[in-house]
Amino acid sequence: MADWAILFEGKYDGHALKVSMLDSFILTELYSNDSANLVINVIYVGYAKGDLESFAETLPKDNLLYLIHGSNRTDKFFCLTVPSVAIPNNKVEMDREITKQIQVLAKTKKVVFDIAETYDIDLKDLHESGKDAQAAFFINPLNVFKAMQKPTGLQKISDVKLNFGHMLTLGKHKASEELASEEIDAFRKTIIFGKKENQKGLIFDITEEFSLGAIPVVVFDFEKSYLGLKQANPDAELVKQFNSNSEPTGFPIESLYYDGTSNSNLWVDLSSVSLESFAELFGLFKEYKEIFKRAKDNNPASIDELIGYISKVGPDEQIKEYDLYLAKRMAHTLKLTYPNLFKGKISLDGVDKVISNKIGKITLLTITGNNIEKYLISQNIIKSFGTKENIAFVIPSAGFFCPKSLNLIQNDICNYLLSFNGYFVLSANSISDLNDALIKYKSIQIDVISETDVALKVGNASPYRLLLRPSVSNNGN
């Protein structure tokens, strides 16, 4: 076999893991504790220019689409996969299995490239895509490991099983009444559609599963609908009847809120808000905008700092003395109108905490105020956690933030979600209520049929019906 270039070699959940690359094929080797056996998998990675989202519908089942959003470009990749296989750890077995998997992928690749000729899309091997595209794909080399398909022979080396992540269980297959589970990473970008009044139980269940999978969760709970997460379901018999292994459980909850008073523990850091969004929200005239721009160039975090920097702006050919007076007056008016909103830097330490390495903390965000206050605080929070991978945002009624047509602050929020490295769950009444870019970005779509009946579609696979499990916490139903 040719030499593979090592991308990653180290420990993953206590097991030895090696990720290597040869041309555009990526090999993962995951070893049992005694190194006598391993799970082996090869994937092919291609690079695309054009409408990959539409073309992805033609890809074979269980293959993956990656969109990597940068500051000024979006790189598009697709991964062709084959099932992982558990084998004894010896070179002959490894070489035989690697060759077999590459041959299968090569055949699939040829079919995909042939089909692509009828689409407005240009496909390339990853190793021919250019250094910038390759750098984007390998921001986190372990993302490749997450593309592995779970092997059917995994029971042969059961001590490796945890490396495939927490299995998220929302209920039972409606057709067979067998428990239905999916890898938790399949829920990294989840979109929910259906009547708002029927979504609550599903959102409770997903939030519980994230927390049980050691993923901290931030729930945008503007209507205080999810306080019951901290209480165990009072109907223990119902919980046990659905699944004898389940127990009613309350979860560790922290509440962060803004209600316009000085007691609020949420507010806005002005340095995280773009001038354009600020100007649109508060209707800055062109003459004032230049003044605010010069002040904001100093990155003021609070309204008091902004006022101080405005005071240092002097008149010149662009700025008149009277305009400076009016700009200062406007800033003071904002301070009087929102005395506890623009207070500066905010610490969100502990929100992404995992308790005893087993339970993800749940944080409920409640914002009582007008739309401007909700937009600004939410934008600040989403931006703050943009680089975190092990955290989930659950945003009911997400169409409020990211509708089809966006104003500037909504566009900021939408872009932060598109570049967010962690998990999100966005719900809306229908597909017409949510921005198209987010819908295309989804990894799972769940259509709510009733309070207990949903249709779940993972990636490009066919949807299946699911009877939701009772929440282990108290959802009030």
Image (cartoon, rainbow, N blue to C red):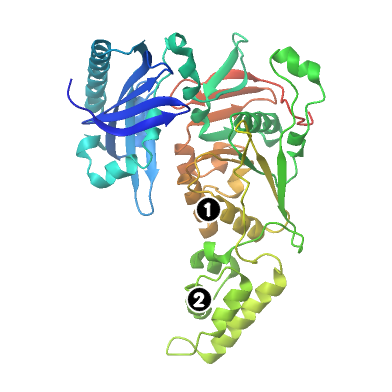
> Where does residue 357 sit, x and y in percent of width and height?
60, 33
Q: Position of residue 369 (x, y in %)?
A: 72, 58
- Give the camera-side residue of 185 and 360: 360
Q: Is residue 37 left or right of residue 471?
A: left
Q: Does residue 72 lie above or below 96 as drawn?
A: below
The vertical placement of 250 against 176, above or below, is below
- According to the picture, the residue beneath numbered tag 2 turns out to be 289
In the rendered view, tell whether residue 286 sits above or below residue 429. below
Q: Quadrant of residue 465?
A: top right
Which residue occupies 27% across, 16% down? Answer: 101
Asked if one can make out residue 57 in the rendered structure from this viewpoint, the answer is no
Which residue is the extreme one toward the right? 234
Element type where label 2 sits in the image: helix
Q: How many residues crowd mark 1 within 10 Å: few (<14), some (14–19), many (20+)? A: some
Q: Could you tell me which quadrant the C terminus lies in?
A: top right
Foreground label between 2 and 1: 1
Q: Quadrant of the N terminus?
A: top left
Q: What's the mark number on residue 383? A: 1
User: Of callouts 2 and 1, which one flags the residue occurring earlier in the amino acid sequence?
Assistant: 2
Which amino acid type corresponds to the residue marked 1 in the rendered image? Lys
For disc 2, the neighbor class at 10 Å (few under 14, some 14 to 19, many from 20) is: some
Q: Residue extending furthest front?
A: 34
Q: Measured from the top left, where is residue 82 in percent x and y? A: 34, 18
Q: Is residue 5 visible?
A: yes
